[in-house]
Image (cartoon, grey):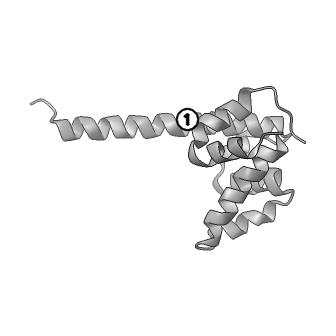
Amino acid sequence: MSPDISQMAQLFYVLFMLATLVFCIIGEWKMLEKAGEHGWAVLIPFYGLYVMSKVAFGNGWFMLLQFIPCVGVIVNFMQFYKIGKRFGKGAVFSIGLIFLTPVFMMILGFDDSTYN
């Protein structure tokens, strides 16, 4: 019995999402190391959010705002904007960071920018 087209599409989707997750983890790991934090923090759910907020805002407790409905989306956009600014990137890069997170995290993690 051969798999039908919907099973193949589901398999492709799952593999695509796993690849996206791996790219996000690698990019964020390298970015956190460049910021002077522990890269492995990205693997621990709430601690990873805390460290990302600390890198972006200077205070990790801003991560609690991400759990408030509607406010969380705005805080998340602000966090990506601030991370871009902290690494010397412009607003266009920050927009890319918001909408194409895996690609722009990899760029941020592996380019020669420094954390300010």
Q: Residue at x 58, y 73 (%)?
A: 69
Q: Is residue 47 visible?
A: no
Residue 36, given in percent of the width and then of the height, sits at 86, 39
Amino acid type for the residue under numbered disc 1: Val
Residue 71, given in percent of the width and then of the height, sits at 65, 71
* Position of residue 104 in the picture relative to residue 52 (left or right): left
Foreground residue among 102 and 17: 102
| Quadrant into which the N terminus falls | top left
On screen, residue 110 above or below 67? above
Secondary element under disc 1, as helix, strand or loop, is helix
* Position of residue 20 in the picture relative to residue 109 (left or right): left
Q: Which residue is mark 1?
A: 22
Foreground residue among 45 and 75: 75
On screen, residue 40 above or below 80? above
Q: Residue at x 70, y 51 (%)?
A: 80
Q: Residue 62, located in which quarter of the rendered image?
A: bottom right
* Position of residue 69 in the picture relative to residue 90 (left or right): left
Residue 43, given in percent of the width and then of the height, sits at 64, 45
Q: Residue 116, located in which quarter of the rendered image?
A: top right
Q: Residue at x 62, y 49 (%)?
A: 98
